Image (spheres, helix red, strand yellow):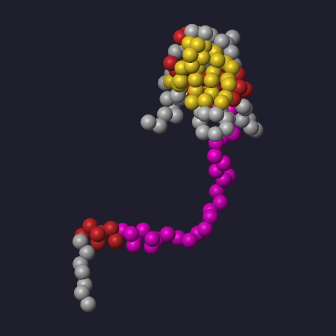
Amino acid sequence: MTVRRLAPPAALAAALLLACGCSVSTTGAVRNGQPATGVQPGTRLYFLDQHGIRLAIRPTAQREDLQQTLNTLLAGPDQSEQRQGLYSELPVKGRVEATATPGVVTLRLSWPAASLSAPTIQQLVCTTEDAPTTGPVPKVAIVSSDAPSAIQQQCDLHRTG
């Protein structure tokens, strides 16, 4: 019988592999708190603060649909959100009409898009991407009186690449 000696890195890897499996206890499930449920219920809105854009979740029994979510965003932050330093630069008297097609949500603004800052546009886009829709996260297209051709936007906070 021939005994082969393992090279030092292979021997170390083998020893680590054996050590990792030796100390795992078999306690089973440990109950501690509520089970994970995925997306936190409530309306997900993006407002601005001194550092940029920030998510605010308004607790509700069920999430609002896309148009309701945008209407809530346009109403601005509530008193609690304002105390946290959140604000909005969206026009108070403005309207946004959302039209969803597979993979794309078109936002028709009642004011010129050029009047909005980049962070304000991000409020709309991030809120739209987080609103309940069917299928994967939609692409967002913005249409307004000064931009009749749809301008594609993506939430900077959700950007993966």
Question: Residue 113: x percent and y percent?
Answer: 56, 13
Question: Residue 46: x percent and y percent?
Answer: 60, 27
Viewer-nearest residue: 70 or 98: 98
Name the magenta segment's main secondary structure: loop
Left or right side of 35 for 147:
left
Quarter that holds the N terminus: bottom left
Question: Residue 27: x percent and y percent?
Answer: 58, 69
Q: Can residue 78 be seen by looking at this rendering?
A: no
| Res 2 quadrant in image | bottom left
Question: Which residue is pictured at 54% across the width and 20% down the height?
Answer: 151
Quarter that holds the C terminus: top left
The residue stretch that appears in magenta: 16-44
Q: Magenta includes 35? A: yes
Question: Residue 92: x percent and y percent?
Answer: 67, 13
Question: Which residue is pictured at 59% across the width and 36% down the height?
Answer: 137
| Res 120 quadrant in image | top right
| Res 63 quadrant in image | top right
Q: Residue 102, relative to residue 16: is it above or below?
A: above
Viewer-nearest residue: 149 or 146: 149
Q: Can residue 62 be seen by looking at this rendering?
A: yes
Q: How many marks?
A: 0
- Looking at the image, the residue that sits furthest to the right is 61
Viewer-nearest residue: 47 or 91: 91
Q: Residue 2, relative to residue 50: is it above or below?
A: below
Q: Residue 150, relative to residue 43: is it above or below?
A: above
Question: Which residue is pictured at 53% across the width and 70% down the height?
Answer: 25
Q: Magenta includes 30? A: yes
